[in-house]
Image (cartoon, rainbow, N blue to C red):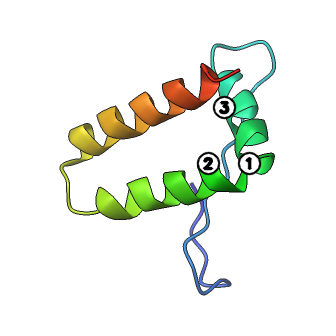
Amino acid sequence: MMVTDAYEEDVAIQVVANNTEFEFFIDFRDKLRSNPRLVSEYNQLKIDCKYLPHDEYRSIKSAFIESVLNES
């Protein structure tokens, strides 16, 4: 991760190597890009989980990502 004060909001960039088990993040990104409702739901999830322990937040976020990837 790199840290910068160049933006008013937190920004994170995720790099995914080709032909790895992490390519599902690209599918997830594409589904979010094509559906503003999913973006709103994902953002709300992150807000709602702000004060949860990290493991609990990751579990909830993973369930959301899996549900999005399993949508037709």
Name the residue nearer the viewer: 29 or 16: 29
Up the image or down, 5 lies above or below 20; here it is below
**Mark on residue 35?**
1
Q: Label 3 amino acid?
A: Phe
Q: Position of residue 24 (x, y in %)?
A: 67, 23
Kind of element beneath mark 2: helix
Q: Position of residue 14 (x, y in %)?
A: 66, 45
Kind of element beneath mark 1: loop
Residue plotted at (56% across, 54% down): 1
On-image quarter of the C terminus: top right
What residue is disc 3 on?
25
Nearer the observer: mark 3 or 1; the answer is: 1
Nearer the observer: mark 2 or 3; the answer is: 2
Ranked by sequence position, the earlier of labels 2 and 3 is 3
Kind of element beneath mark 3: helix
Q: Quadrant of residue 30?
A: top right
**Mark on residue 38?**
2
Q: Local crowd at mark 1 within 10 Å, few (<14), some, or many (≥20)?
A: few
